[in-house]
Image (cartoon, rainbow, N blue to C red):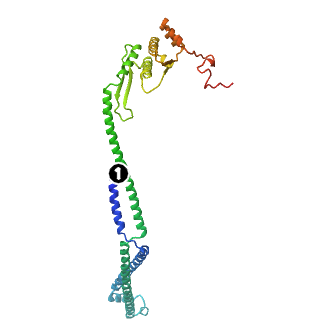
Amino acid sequence: MDARAQIAELSERIQTLRSRLQTMQVADDYERMRQEADALTQQLRQRESRLAQIDFQLAGIEQALQRRADIEREVLLAFYRGLEHVFKPQALADFATVEAFHRSLAEQRHRRLSRDRLRLQDERRRVEDERAQLARQRDERLAYLGSHHALDDYQAVAAELARMQADLDLLQRYRSASEAWDAEELELRRNLAEDDRLAADYVAEQPLAWADRRFRELIHALYPREAAGIVLGNNTGDNKLRYDLKVQVQGQGSDGINAARIMAFDWLVFRHGAHHTMRHLWHDNGLFDPIDPNQRAAWLRRVRAELAGSGMQYILSINTENYASTRELLGEDGAWLDEAVIVRLRGDADAHKLLGERIGVVEPSP
């Protein structure tokens, strides 16, 4: 999420948490009250369980008291009379005696159930009173716990508030830095736009027209039919380059023309460049090798003419074949090239090398 949205969300949460923290009542006896509430809840459950048992027993007693004999007296008497022809009369007890016995059993059972009912009803009233008292005590402690908090709860809320405040401070610092970066970027873009405008005005003045003219003269001395030029452009991209400088020769994809392009630009910087104190320029055979001997001869004639009386020096290293083909084209007027040869290097001995010794070559082990 965006930092501003997170800051707004955190600020609202912090305000809510701070208000909650201010209204929290911390109780030193919170844990003791919680334990008492738990113990009272356990006792209350025991009383409720006992009441359920008593109600079940009372319901069974009521059902037993409502129960009556399924066989009426006349039916039982007829049953006894039907047995007289099977058993001897002496074997059969007197019906009245049997009836009296059963009546006494029913009366005793009724009295016993009635006593049990009275006892259970008394116990139920006592247990109900205990349950009501326990419920009242438990509710008082729960109400106390609902309006108070433990010290651990207070510390947990305070720690959460501190964490949120730290996150908010970090986000606010980030937002401030981001806004400063945005302002700086806007200022840089404004300055860059102004620099682009000034650079465009400068390019429009064609400050390198003189360099372009001299460069084309150098190239046309070697390749009269090839278009060439130096172009200065305004670089408006997001980079560190203020100007684009293009040194171009038509056909520079050819090794010979590309080598001539490099040599001509080097010569232009050497002879007419500013802010340097170079008094000599060195070109290696790697540049001369792809160039046609006619262009090499034309190049050396122009170099010799421009260096006359300048106090500058042009050094070139060229192999024997390229030197010979160039010297041949100069004819009798090329004696000055022979006089310009300072050293001839050969590979037949170390003394004939450039520094007179072999450097960086490891002799093979025997």
In the image, residue 337 sits, relative to residue 232, either above or below, namely above
Is 51 or 311 nearer to us in this picture?
A: 311
Give residue 191's quadrant in the image: top left
Residue 8 drawn at (x, y percent): 32, 55
Residue at 34%, 48% (x, y): give it.
179
Horizontal placement of 330 versus 10: left or right? Answer: right
**Secondary structure found at label 1:** helix
Residue at 36%, 30% (x, y): give it.
243
Is 19 or 175 nearer to us in this picture?
A: 175
Which of the image's four quarters has the C terminus? top right
Residue 17 drawn at (x, y percent): 35, 63
Number of residues whose C-alpha sits closer than 10 Å to that of mark 1, classed few (under 14), some (14–19) or many (20 or more): some
Is 357 or 132 nearer to us in this picture?
A: 357
In the image, residue 124 sits, relative to residue 289, either above or below, namely below
Give residue 165's quadrant in the image: bottom left
- In the picture of the structure, the residue carrying the numbered disc 1 is 3
Residue at 39%, 14% (x, y): give it.
220
In the image, residue 321 sits, relative to residue 77, either above or below, namely above
In the image, residue 240 sits, relative to residue 322, either above or below, namely below
Q: Amino acid at mark 1?
A: Ala
Residue 327 drawn at (x, y percent): 50, 9
Marker count (numbered) = 1
Residue 65 drawn at (x, y percent): 35, 86
Is 47 or 335 nearer to us in this picture?
A: 335
Give residue 122's quadrant in the image: bottom left
